[in-house]
Amino acid sequence: MAPTGKASDDLRAFDKSEKMMKIRNIMRVSANEGNLSTVISFENLGTNREAIFIVTLLRQHGYNVEYGDDVIIVK
C-alpha cells in the first residue's frame, strides 16, 4: 500500500535527507566491496521514526529488508 497524505509528504522529504543519504552511502560502499547484502545496525538507523522511514523507503525502492539482532539486512 502506497503512503498518502502527510505520511507521503514526510517520506518524500526524508528520502532527500542527510540520514537517508548516509544509509545510501553505506549501501554503495558495501556494493562496491562486492557484498550481495548490506548489514546496517539499528544504531545507524536513528530514531524509531527514522528507522521506519528508512525501511519503508528501501522497500519502495525495491530492496528486500530483513531483521536481525540489532541490525537490518538489505538485499
Image (tube, rainbow, N blue to C red):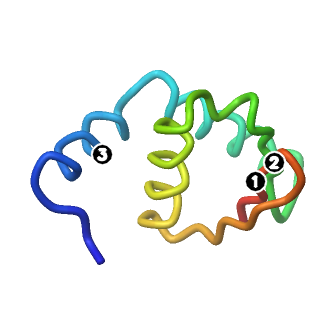
Identified at 75% across, 29% down, the residue is 43
In what element is the residue under mark 2?
strand
Residue 28: image location, x then y, percent: 69, 43
User: Alpha-carbon neighbours of circle 1 within 10 Å: few (<14), some, or many (≥20)?
Assistant: some
Mark 3 in CB contact with mark 1 (< 8 angstroms): no
Q: Which residue, given by chain and number where applicable, does mark 1 sit on?
A: 72
Relative to 75, 51 lies left or right? left
Relative to 20, 13 lies left or right? left
Q: Which residue, given by chain and number where applicable, does mark 2 sit on?
A: 71
Above or below, comparing residue 15 to residue 55 in the picture: above
Q: What residue type is labelled 2?
A: Val
Mark 2 in CB contact with mark 3 (< 8 angstroms): no
The CA span between labels 3 and 1 is 19 Å
Q: Nearer the viewer, residue 17 or 68?
A: 68
User: Alpha-carbon neighbours of circle 2 within 10 Å: few (<14), some, or many (≥20)?
Assistant: some
Q: Which amino acid does label 1 sit on?
A: Ile
Relative to 19, 70 lies left or right? right
Mark 1 in CB contact with mark 2 (< 8 angstroms): yes
